[in-house]
Amino acid sequence: SFCLLPDPQRENPKRKASGGGMATGREAGEPAMAEEERDWADLTPVCLAEAFSRLGPEDLWRGAMACCRAWREAARSRPALFAALDLEPAFDAVGADAAEWWTPAFQRRVDAMLRSAASLAAGELREVRVRHCSDDALAFAAKSSPQLSILSIQSSPSVTDRSMLTVASCCPILTELDISYCYEVSYKSLEVIGQSCPNLVVLKRSIFNWLDSSEHVRTVPAEYLRACPQDGDREAIAISRSMPKLKQLVLRFAKLSGVGLNSIAEGCKELEVLDLFGCANLTSRGIEQAAANLKNLEMLVKPNFYIPRSAFHMERYGHWQLYDERFQTNVFQI
């Protein structure tokens, strides 16, 4: 089960102790002569902060900062410890989307972490990788983080153009942006982000698999899946006109046509990676023509017009497997 890190502003009552409360060998049941007892309370805040800088996010937030007030204050004395908030490893550890992530309660937990990180970093927050945050929390973090260069907020249904405009105005050195599965973010945000963040080199703007949404129906709200963005060409044109320095562009399952793809090829000449997986409105000829105009292109992920049916469909409609084998539908794959 997914467990977000606790809010570091709250002290763990079970670990209250003066100065640090570190258990000694005797407290752990070991003989008194096993080793010399050490009074961790004598460590200065500078020494504690230096030790904390060698901890990973999990040990820092759930260990040191939850131990006691003295340790938490020592950590807060060094904002650089909170320069990055990366929750992706925790999400990836689950291995699949979960229905509870799409609830208001879970969003509040993510918001608490984002707000805490922005406050503790004291203007030095440079990297944010979260999911399911809200408009207000994102705007708060953006206003507090002028040094932010990497922002990933995929699967955040409550994020809209309002907070993205705040990001554009407050985070001018942004170099990487991932707004995949954020359906309330429109082409207007892409335009302003591109104009305000001239150093942007990575953009990820994927949407859910609308060709076969069965893999998401048990987790993602049905009304959200139906709200899939339809203006793929308009977004592509906004990208081409405002983000000329892009080197990596991911548009999985985007509903752009040859018009949008040609616009990208003309406006984003420095592209090295272009991911078009699932973009079923494109043709092989159109992709080849666009790729020919991208001289720096090193990796091109083409659409796969044959999307393997999920286990959900195979269980309910077993005859599809016979159909695929009989007519060899994967010959249309490009």
Image: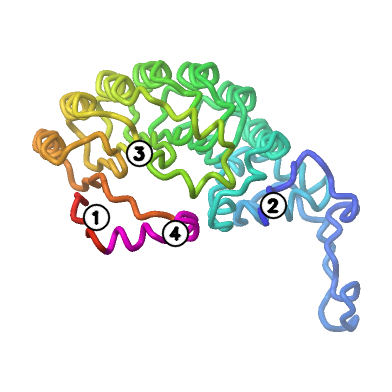
Say whether residue 67 is left or right of residue 167: right
State the residue in front, 233 or 41.
233
- Of helix, strand and loop, which mostly describes the magenta segment? helix
Q: The N terminus appears in which quarter of the rendering?
A: bottom right
Does label 4 or label 1 sit earlier along the sequence?
Answer: 4
What span is colored magenta in the figure? 311-325
On the image, numbered disc 4 is attached to which residue? 314
Q: Tell me which corner region of the image, top left, top right, bottom left or bottom right, holds residue 232.
A: top left
Mark 4 to mark 3 CA distance (whole Å): 22 Å
The quarter holding residue 158 reads top right
Three-letter code, disc 3: Phe
Q: Which of label 2 and label 1 is nearer to you? A: 1
Q: In the displayed structure, would residue 316 be above or below residue 108?
A: below
Q: Is 117 drawn above or below residue 95 in the view shown?
A: above
Say whether residue 179 is magenta.
no
- C-alpha span from label 4 to label 1: 15 Å
Residue 324 among those drawn in magenta: yes
**Residue with the mark numbered 1:** 329
Q: Looking at numbered disc 4 in the image, what kind of residue is underneath it?
A: Met
Please give the residue where the numbered disc 3 appears in the rendered image: 253
Tag 1 secondary structure: helix
Residue at image mark 2: 3
Residue 69 numbered mark, or none: none
